[in-house]
Image (cartoon, grey):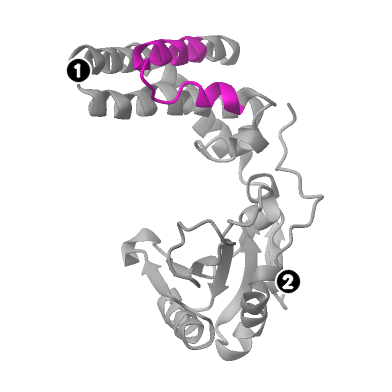
Amino acid sequence: MPDASPDQTDQPDLSRYDDVLAFLAALPDRVPALRVVVVNGSAVTGGWDEHSDLDVEAWCDGEAAASYDALLGLARDELPVDHVWELPEATWPTGRQCFVHLQPDAADLSRPTRLLDVVVQTMPERLTIDARRHGVPLVLHDPGGLLVLEDDDEAQMQAQRAQAVEQTAARRQTGAWLVERAIARGDLAEATSLHLRFAVEPLVRLLRIEHCPARHDFGLRYLRTDLPPGMAERVEALLPGPDLAARARAAFAWQDEVLRRLT
């Protein structure tokens, strides 16, 4: 399967966020430190639907906290904000992130979702985005043409992939023992956690390395867009269930199969 970002030929319908897009487009006039504002996430990578949030990323001059606070204050004043979850300041070394809910009870999927995932960061010396990994962003503000579409360092990613393969192979027997032991002891919660950590997640990492290496570290997300047809369903059949021991053994056997091909 070719290593490519998900299909971007179909333009998603973002109309339920029209008020937010207008707010964001005008924002740099009111927060002058903002240099670049884009929409990314499923709106540009694929998988957009009526329950997708709107992923917003912005870069600014100076400390990100000041621009972040200004943006969030304006959003509270001018958008129908129900509540905000702000991630701890230490989450981003050069920025801040929050989830802005524009309606109560986001888990109520009887209506379209309206939720913003906002990240504000300090402008780096050179701003690049790897479209293979993150899609081509929808640029709302970049008058200086600062954002450059450029692949991430391939040597660095190859080293990360090689280390992941090496570690999965070396950990294979230890992981299987931990899962089987927890099952034998009747520790279902522990066994479930270990099954995901040592059987399923490393398997998916190997499958990503084989089929979509540019997104090798995207975990269990986007399996239907990143892996060959039918493979996501095979992975889902290995998720924790009443026959956990059989699922774990099948997952480790699949790991062995992929490891033979990769090594």
Q: Position of residue 92 (x, y in %)?
A: 40, 61
Nearer to us of marks 2 and 1 is 1
Q: Residue 199, how many percent across, how many down?
A: 40, 21
Q: Amino acid at mark 2?
A: Gly
- Look at the image and say whether residue 237 sits in the magenta stretch: yes
Q: Residue at x 25, y 24 (%)?
A: 188
Task: Report whether 181 appears left or right of 119.
Answer: left
Q: Secondary structure at mark 1?
A: loop
**Of 171 and 179, the residue lying toward us:** 179
Quadrant where the image shows the N terminus: top right
Circle 2 packing at 10 Å, graded few (<14), some (14-19), many (20+), is few
Does the stretch in magenta take in 252? yes
Region in magenta: 232-256
Q: Looking at this rendering, what residue extends furthest in the front direction? A: 110
Mark nearer the N terminus (2 vs 1): 2
Q: Is residue 209 visible?
A: no
Q: Which residue is mark 1?
A: 186
Q: Identify the disc placed on residue 145.
A: 2
Residue 11 in which image quadrant:
bottom right
Q: Amino acid at mark 1?
A: Gly
Q: Taking the image as drawn, is residue 180 in sight?
A: yes
Q: Is residue 198 left or right of residue 52?
A: left
Answer few, some or many: residues within 10 Å of disc 1's Cα (few below 14, many 20 plus, some between 14 and 19).
few
The answer to which of 27 and 78 lies nearer the viewer is: 78
